[in-house]
Amino acid sequence: MKILLAEDDPNLGAIISEYLEAKGYQTHLCLNGEDAFKVFLREKWNLCIFDVMMPLMDGFTLTKEIRNHNKDVPVIFLTAKSMKEDTIEGFKAGGDDYLTKPFSMEELVLRIKAILKRTEKSDGTMSSQEFAIGKYIFNPTLNTLSKEGEETHKLTSREVELLKLLCININDTLERNFALRAIWSEDNYFNARSMDVYIARLRKYLSGDPNIEILNVHGKGFKLVDRSSASH
């Protein structure tokens, strides 16, 4: 498991790097965004951790550049900023999580594990997993939803993450707060409205099978119901 770390404070960078190495993550430390971008292009990485305020290239710009080459690698931002505008800017840049300094090393590792768990890819170390949803086949690795062998939709990363959580909890309630924290990292009004939009999209995508339905569970969350088979 390889992690690219970009942190312009050499002391903090060394502490994070040593801690992650001790936890079994192969970590490469860069002291500015420009060097990090060059290193990123040379090798394959499972996850990136970027400080926001860095010389030569800040973390947001670095992530935008990386997204031109790789849309899937997870990115965690480290920052002293805590304003909601900065958080939103970070997600718009393509970030997956946001950790405000000071933070505990234990929390960072927990965030890393959570992100890697929900963004599994077929990178040679993880096998592809498909979900059967009535007449549909959902492949979270390829970001595809297919019906009767034909691809019906190419899903965005957020749609993939949300549908995967629904599939894992199929015929059971997916708690709204859990989904918000897992995918958007924060349970707030802005993110909740965003999730409602994605739920509406997924309902539309699955509307071709009357046995499939995404239900609102009042006060709790959502439930993906598959009435075609009790074995799912």
Image (cartoon, grey):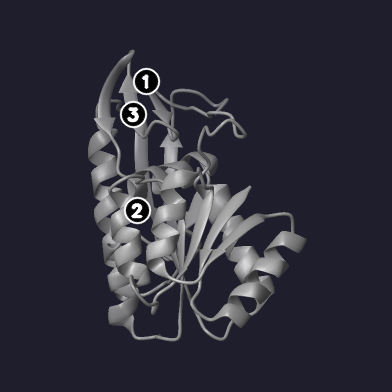
Query: Viewed as shown, does residue 77 lie left or right of 69?
Result: right
Hey, which quadrant is residue 32 in on the image? bottom left
Residue, disc 1: 135
Q: Secondary structure at mark 3?
A: strand
Among the two numbered marks 2 and 3 on one chain, the one whose residue lies closer to the N terminus: 2
Residue 47 point in image, percent of width and height: 52, 53
Residue that appears at 50% across and 23% down: 229
Three-letter code for the amino acid on which mark 3 is drawn: Leu
Residue, disc 2: 66
| Figure check: 136 above or below 196 | above
Residue 193 point in image, percent of width and height: 27, 65
Per the model, the C-alpha gap separating discs 2 and 3 is: 26 Å
| Figure check: 78 above or below 153 | below
Among the two numbered marks 3 and 1 on one chain, the one whose residue lies closer to the N terminus: 1
Residue that appears at 33% across and 70% down: 57
Three-letter code for the amino acid on which mark 2 is drawn: Ile
Three-letter code for the amino acid on which mark 1 is drawn: Lys
Residue, disc 3: 145
